[in-house]
Image: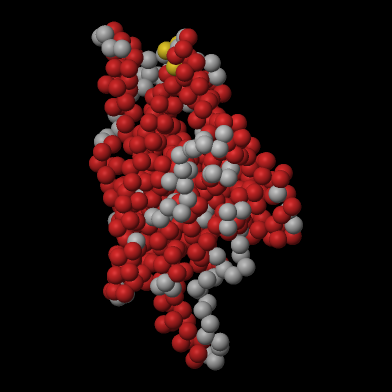
Amino acid sequence: MIHSVQRRWYPLSFAVAALVLLPLSVLLFSWHEIDTTIWAHLWETQLPRLLGNTLVLVLGVATGVLLLGVSLAWLTSLCEFPGRRWLDWALMLPFAIPAYVLAFVFIGLLDFAGPVQTAAREWFGSGVRFPRVRSTGGVVLVLVLVFYPYVYLLARSAFIAQGRGLMEAARVLGRTPWQAFWHVALPMAWPAIGAGLALAMMETLADFGAVAVFNFDTFTTAIYKTWYGFFSLTSATQLASLLLLAVMLVLYGERRARGVPRASAERKRAAPLYRLHGWRALAASAWCGLVLLCAFVIPLIQLLVWIWQRGRFDLDSRYVGLILHSLSLGALAALITVSVALLMAFARRQAPVRPVKAAVGLANLGYALPGSVLAVSIMLAFSFIDRHLLGPAAEWLAIDPKPILLGSLGALLLAYLVRFMAVAFGPLESSLARIRPSLPQASRSLGVGGPALFMRIYLPLLVPGTLSAALLVFVDVLKEMPATLLMRPFGWDTLAVRVFEMTSEGAWARAALPAITLVLVGLLPVILLIRRSARL
């Protein structure tokens, strides 16, 4: 018989799981009514191209992040070459740059009227031609540079954890370093690499800002255009369900392909295995430095140049309002999300039974839902509630029956909660697992229980994990574009929305000020990742 204390956690865990299931159920119910006119127009004009573009984009980014992430992880974790010690952590810095920021920086730099092509024509004549940056290859390159750290970070950890013995045994058996990598190190690291690859592919499917800057139509841009162009929330929701299906197929394929992680009983390596010399060392340094230069250093310098040329003149009261709106949304979302995630972590600890574990697992699925999918599903649900429940009730009470939930701040905060629950849950669960059960048991034996037990025992020990979770959610909310753009209340523009508005007009220099702010704030969780990885 389940203890009564465990049963108390049932309603909470089931309620939070229902929040994640709400978008899924709305997506399914949206197919009860199909606007054949809109779908016929989409099929004739856009849908085949959207399918082709999305498939090419996902495959291109997957190939690029694999090549880039694995090669960089192999070099920095197993080889010694000039600059390796600082490149080891510096290659994580592109995590701080949102994809849409790197996208407009690349276009501003490499477009026909940009400084690179302009300087080339001045030096070598007007006949110099560069490949078009506004192309499929351009958007794939930008997303690869933004998302390769997912594979790099996990592959690097996997390579370091393999120890010296396996690679030395392969060398004793006559394998070259390349053969040892291909036949020993890579298969053992594949589960971690596959997990990073799945994250990069999901982020690619969910991306809206970068593809919008490149005018590269995918499902995310089609959702936005269907909602605001055709004014059909139902059709946008149906498109979102197809995008969600693609995300679920990616997750399923990744789980089937990566296999079961194989643990190694060896100690982690304290030093690299291979010391490179001559041209090999120079090539390794050049390769890692080139990636860092293109993905972080040059974009950061260009943003600073644009701010000095034009962006600094936008630093007025309106910009202060954008910062305040962004900080307010980030703080509110972090407070709500961390509070709910903490309750869910306690539910799993205090009631480790199958129903609660299943509910907690469902509650953490929201991170796999793209922001655009969450936006249209939540707004469709709230539109139904406003129209069929709250509207008639307001009329009966002789109150103005205007929409209450639709376009409200609560709807946007709910989307953030569902989207970033998993981000907060991970650090909190890890911190809670470090608290031995003997501590609260001893406190109860001394007569300390209930809220006093939480305040005196749990809270002081959970402060580091809670701050990390709040910081991660805060930064993710500041950088989130699709959900904020689609769901923000009137007058609640943020830094991410400002970047979208300026890049839509081609005003790269004016987008630099909010962009650099997002980059600087994004460096905070990257520093946490670097410090954590340094303990390996």
The front one of 429 and 501 is 501
* Quarter of the image that includes the N terminus: bottom left
Residue at 70% from the left image edge and 49% from the top image edge:
310
Side of 309 where 403 appears, left or right? left
The front one of 207 and 226 is 226
Q: Residue 505 in the image: state x and y as whole percent.
A: 58, 57
Q: How is the image coloured?
A: secondary structure
Residue 381, can we see it? no
Q: Residue 244 in the image: state x and y as whole percent.
A: 34, 57
Q: Residue 435 in the image: state x and y as whole percent.
A: 49, 40
Q: Quadrant of residue 60?
A: top left
Residue at 29% from the left image edge and 58% from the top image edge:
48
The answer to whether 504 is drawn above or below residue 437 in the figure is: below
Side of 32 where 95 appears, left or right? right
Residue 202, can we see it? yes
Q: Residue 298 in the image: state x and y as whole percent.
A: 59, 35
The front one of 381 and 106 is 106
The front one of 392 and 112 is 112
Side of 231 where 2 appears, left or right? left
Residue at 74% from the left image edge and 57% from the top image edge:
316
Side of 516 where 181 appears, left or right? left
Q: Quadrant of residue 164?
A: top left
Residue at 52% from the left image edge and 85% from the top image edge:
401
The answer to whether 391 is drawn above or below residue 446 in the figure is: below
The number of callouts visible is 0
